[in-house]
Amino acid sequence: MEKIKQNAFVKKVGFNRIILVAVMLLMYLAFGAMTGGKFFTVSRLMNIFNYVYFLGFLALGVTFVIATGGIDFSIGPVMFCCALVSGYSFYNHGVPMGLALVLCILVGLLFGVWNGYLVAYVKIPPFIVSMASMNMAKGIAAVFTKTQSVSWPQSSEPAGWYRTFVKSGSFPTGIVLFLAVAVICAIILNKTKAGRYILCLGSNSEAVRLSGVDVKKWTMLAYTICGILVGIAAIFYVGAYTTVQPGYGDQYNNEAIACCVMGGTSMAGGIASIAGTVIGTLIISLLQQGILALGFSKDYQFIITGFIVIGAVYADVSARRRKN
């Protein structure tokens, strides 16, 4: 095993990432075998991609937050709030679709700035801030829409042009855009000063502060990036699923966090992998569709996702203990 880990290719790609890809492929084959090959269809693959788009953007966003040693449990409800506020504005206030999409991202940005400010400058614990923002997002969406659900335009309607972000004809343009954004996130996190400071905050924020770095600014930036990506996630959610209802979104918090920790992002902060988050997103999305294909309810996915989070965090804690 050690010889394999020391292989030049394995070291460059990452042993854990190779294992995750192998697990993903085995899961795909296993679901195909258990469904008599019915899982190997284009429509099923498109369903997996539809789930990847919005969940992937949520996971990319929360990766930046977790890298600082923080957490954000408001991302799912905030995503729904973005979609509801902008969709309701389109239908009931005559906002053009282009501006509605911008508004979608702006709402996410505002929540990101709000969360970042409270954590970085007011010094409220991230857990408390995210719990408060989760309830605020649900409340704002319900009040703004008068508790009504919002159905975004279909691709056959003139205003449905935004759906080409998800699928153009039979081509899944969404996966290309998601991977492109993932590459940008990886560059920010690994190749820029902002990314290095964000990772350093998770390793030892006090040492970073004593070295003269503005800890507050970089902490707030991480939450702001998360907010922008949550707004983008909302666009891809309505592009894939159309209808949004107030009061929902909680279920996607744990799934997005599971994508991160499974991919190698440490819950203690300081270690993050965008590539790992992408692979984790594919695995969780594959799991979701596999469970539905086998005839089980999504409740089983929640159980399995919970075990995945516990297992990934336990592995991370054990690795840190061995290293120390």
Image (spheres, rainbow, N blue to C red):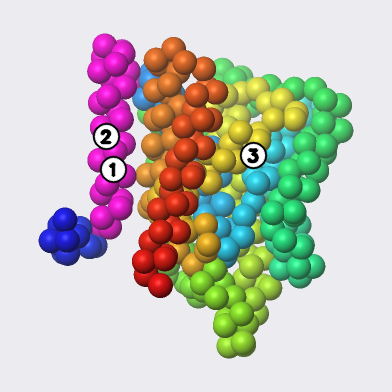
- Residue 169 seen in the current view: no
Which of the two discs, 2 and 3, labels the residue nearer the N terminus?
A: 2
Q: Are marks 1 and 2 in contact (CB under 8 Å)?
A: yes
In reply to whether residue 17 is colored magenta, the answer given is yes
Position of the N terminus by quadrant? bottom left
In reply to whether residue 215 is colored magenta, the answer given is no
Span shown in magenta: 13-42
* Callout 3 secondary element: helix
Query: How many discs appear?
Result: 3
Residue at 51%, 37% (x, y): give it. Answer: 306
Residue under label 2, please give it: 25
Whole-percent x and y of residue 172? 40, 31
Q: Amino acid at mark 3?
A: Gly
Residue under label 3, please give it: 76
Residue 133 horizontal side relative to residue 41, left or right: right
Q: Residues within 10 Å of mark 3 (few under 14, many from 20)?
A: many
Residue at 51%, 30% (x, y): give it. Answer: 303
Residue at 66%, 34% (x, y): give it. Answer: 249
Q: Amino acid at mark 2?
A: Leu
- Does 264 sit above or below residue 238? below
Residue under label 1, please give it: 21
- Does 47 sit above or below residue 193? above
Whole-percent x and y of residue 123? 76, 68
Res. 24 image quadrant: top left
* Callout 2 secondary element: helix
